[in-house]
Image: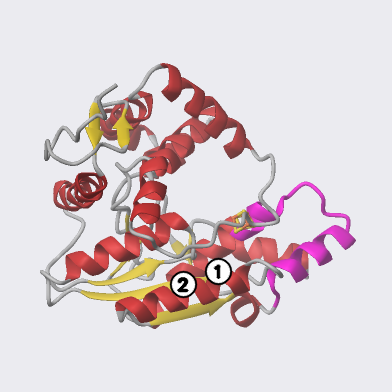
Amino acid sequence: MDTPVCCICKTREAFFFRQYSGERLCKKCFTESIEAKVRSTITRYHMLNFNDHLAIAVSGGKDSLSLLYILAKLKRSRPKTHLTAVTVDEGIKGYRNEALEIASSNCKKLEIPHHIVSFKELYGFTLDEMIFKARKGGQTELTACAYCGVLRRKAINHGARDVKATKIATAHTLDDEVQTVLMNILRGDIARLAKEKPVTSEVHPLFVQKIKPFCEIPEKESALYAYVKKIDFQDTPCPYASGALRNDVRGMINRMEEKHAGTKFTVFKALERLRPALEETAKKEDFKVCAECGEPSALDLCKACELLRHVR
Ligand code: SF4
């Protein structure tokens, strides 16, 4: 049988079949297609101004490091754009230290400044300490991810402000976006569904605006990009990653994609079309400042301070 040839360059051997588009691609054309897609997403959603300072949320995993590499490449043609990598150290023993080292060495290689924000410094406890205290106090309803998700969002915002960034770039992939859409539907959370978008709205001056340049890149392709480019990333999972709702939704969507290629893009595009109507329906949140930490919050006490009260 003949070896399939790349359908773009028509010369090199194809190594990847993109099921949803029917393309067979060689390594070079595959990585170029990912970089081109990221550039077109940035343009379509008006993600960047020429003089933006981007804080790139880098966890040390495949997605965030692929994003770091692509944005570093993009920066070469945009001399006025500044990049700083921001990593949150939640304090997860046996996991986060390795990720921090990997993130730092990639930043050094790309000559991008690296800023670390730690839970311990910001909140007085590591995530391990919080979970230990919460469980000891009989708090069993909330998972580690429930604490981590809220506190990490706040920490990234802090980190971005520390380095005076104008925007935060996160490596949420198409899969992350589609999972979040379905999770919000399953929870009946229309307000969150409306807020889920490639560029967040500017709701308060203390919230740094977030952009998601990977929102149209399937997770499998972001991982493949990291492998082909030989990017060193952490592939050990977090010890707290558990059977949360997201894992069930991930499994369901992946099975659908396997049977009906293009399902993920269909869900993503459906939300794009529904968003204006959702924004009309969802109650506009009025932001004030949290009575405890002074950060913007829809309630008198922000979610992070509420969780920290539980811990204390
Ligand atoms: Fe945090 Fe959960 Fe992710 Fe671990 S798996 S880093 S605890 S959100």
- Name the residue at 26% across, 61% down: 70
From this view, report whether residue 120 is shown above or below residue 309: below
For disc 2, the marked residue is 103
- Residue 132 magenta-drawn? yes
Dividing the image into four quarters, tell me where ligand 1 lies. Answer: bottom right
- Find residue 6 and report its image quarter: top left
State which region is magenta: 125-148
- Sort mark 1 into few (<14), some (14-19) or many (20+) by Cα contacts within 10 Å: many
From this view, report whether residue 179 is shown above or below residue 130: above
For disc 1, the marked residue is 99
Distance between the Cα atoms at labels 1 and 2? 6 Å
Residue 251 position, x and y percent, is: 56, 30
Q: Nearer the viewer, residue 2 or 76?
A: 2
The C terminus appears in which quarter of the rendering? bottom right
Residue type pointed to by label 2: Ala
In contact (CB < 8 Å): disc 1 and disc 2: yes
Residue type pointed to by label 1: Ala
Asked whether residue 182 is in view, the answer is yes
Residue 214 position, x and y percent, is: 32, 49
From this view, report whether residue 21 is shown above or below residue 111: above
- Sort mark 2 into few (<14), some (14-19) or many (20+) by Cα contacts within 10 Å: many
